[in-house]
Amino acid sequence: MKYCASVYRHIRRATRPVTVGDPARGGVIIGGDHPVVKQSMITCDTMDTAACVRETLALVEAGCQLVRITAPTVKDAANLEHIARELRRRGCPVPLVADIHFKPEAALEAARWVEKVRVNPGNYADSKKFVVKEYTDAQYAAELARLEERFTPLVLRCKELGRALRIGTNHGSLSDRILNRSGDTPQGMVESALEFARICRKHDFHHLVFSMKASNPKVMIQSYRLLAARLAELGPDWNYPLHLGVTEAGEGEDGRIKSAIGIGSLLVEGLGDTIRVSLTEDSPHEIPVCEDLIRLTPRLANHQPVPELPLPFDPFNFQRRPTPIIELAPGVPCGAEEPVRVVVTRATFERVAPRLRPRDDVRPEAVYEDLPVLELDPREEISPAAIPRDTHLVTVKDGLDLPAIAAFRLLAARLNQLGRRNPILLKDSLPLDDPPLPPNLALLQASVVLGALLADGIGDAVLVRGEHDPERSLRLAYNILQAAGVRSFKTDYVACPSCGRTLFNLQTVTARIKARTRHLKGVKIAIMGCIVNGPGEMADAHFGYVGGAPGKVNLYVGKTPVKFNIPEAEAVDRLVDLIKEHGRWVEPEPMAETASANS
């Protein structure tokens, strides 16, 4: 299956344009040859009209072009009328999107007042219980008939009123029907979306946008690629636009890195027509990250002709490229199943080495200038004599007029042609940036380039050079490896952004949990404001902290709830107790929380 025109050269996926509102009066067009649309979501109670208006205006002031508002009940959906009316009275024409999960009746009401409705297929017509059940073909057909009965009224209303519809699949909330037939997989996510799309098409409704969100960037990338490939197989009129996002990305540097890996790598491949960066921060902070990713795409995508070699990776299933083990430095094995290693320049090493402590996890593992690395130009055929054996570390030559993602994919393909399995050293940039990029762009550039290649399974060591501050560049390399899911050196957090469904202050609670647990290497903790995506997104987390009711928290082990209705004031302590009960707790070392390199 082919999901994009080329993995070596940027050609934007051709899609039909989908209008949201009236473009002549402030609406937007998603897809076609129109620029990528920036969107976000407000976080307040939908019944608080004044707060909703205030937060929407703040987002628009930051550059947001499409604003989403949750509508968990029919009452909330009805209040969208007042929110929309007040915004228009104040001269704000930005289209609104209603976010719907469990209530089809709320979707029908919301469609009366907003320009677009988002439905989550796993929640819209299903009561998810994670029940293991074998569906016969007849039972499965009956489930689809029930789905069609529940969903068709919304399709007809959107068609009648000229509304757009986003079919927004989430990895964390697939229906039991899908889980039992396809599993908690990208294939299941795609099939979940197509079930709903087939109903839309049955009624000649095509005002559709798809999304395939996951908190794991690799799963997210695979899911969008698989969807694009399936749509291409189904025919040219299945050319619906894509909304890109990594859900529950978290906050700060980690949230930006995860989002950049998922969103940026797909934009470089020509996929994506609208994006949302989901941060556990105030929503206006998301928009500059969207703008930076859009601005970086032409720089990181290759636009010049290069050899179209066979694909050097499986785009739909992660598998690390097989290599032999070599020694980067004394006691530092690299390749095969060894951790992806962190290489630094000599200048960086000399700056950070004096501050290293014996037990620090964030440390240089090799110095670039000391490595016997072969530097190659992958645009040209490589002679077997140029690479004497598989145990040579190889990389792309500096100074090439070729973006790094395309260059390293070509290098992997050239090695495959020769039957060579040499370990590869990845670089975030080939020509050094002059002048240096500001830190926000350097972080995103390194995340997109290295993250995209690591998600392909390419790379055995990484070198970050775009970030010129030595300590930041070292920390950034490790954080990218963690976010890409190829190496764990610290606690991993899955934290959703706030919205009107959130039952506690996510930013405050996330900070409290991190303060208590950030020293737990290899432990993954999910912090979820409500149950909408909770159990599913926590499937690969060790522990979960989930809003169950106002002021009450439920605690999970994996996706299994084990403690219920804990008062919020004591919930963090109870989470720590739960971690201790399951043998994953260690006492923090002195000064561990304040070690800047491990922050």
Image (cartoon, rainbow, N blue to C red):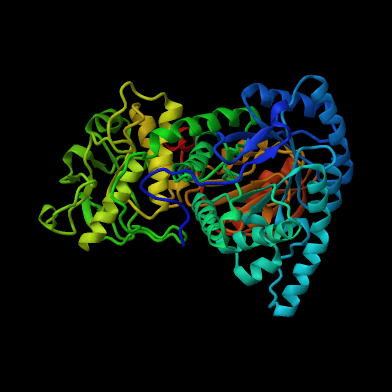
Position of 62 relative to 364 (above/below):
above
What residue appears at the point 10 percent right and 56 percent down from the top-left corner?
385
In this rendering, the count of numbered labels is: 0
Give how far across and how far down residue 270 sits, in percent. Answer: 47, 44
Give how far across and how far down residue 57 sits, in percent. Answer: 72, 23
Give left or right: position of 232 versus 150.
left
Give left or right: position of 253 versus 240.
left
Q: Does residue 480 appear anywhere in the picture?
A: yes
Position of 179 relative to 172 (above/below):
below
Q: Nearer the viewer, residue 32 or 279?
A: 32
Give left or right: position of 18 versus 85.
left
Give how far across and how far down residue 142 sits, in percent. Answer: 78, 73
Q: Does residue 103 appear anywhere in the picture?
A: no
What residue appears at the point 17 percent right and 52 percent down from the top-left corner?
382
Q: Nearer the viewer, residue 19 or 426?
A: 19
Give left or right: position of 154 versus 273.
right
What residue appears at the point 30 percent right and 60 percent down from the top-left corner?
336
Position of 69 relative to 545 (above/below):
above
Give how far across and how far down residue 384 sits, in percent. Answer: 13, 57
Q: Nearer the viewer, residue 28 or 321?
A: 28
> In the rendered image, which quarter is residue 110 located in?
top right
> In the rendered image, which quarter is residue 161 located in?
top right
Q: Nearer the viewer, residue 103 or 383?
A: 383
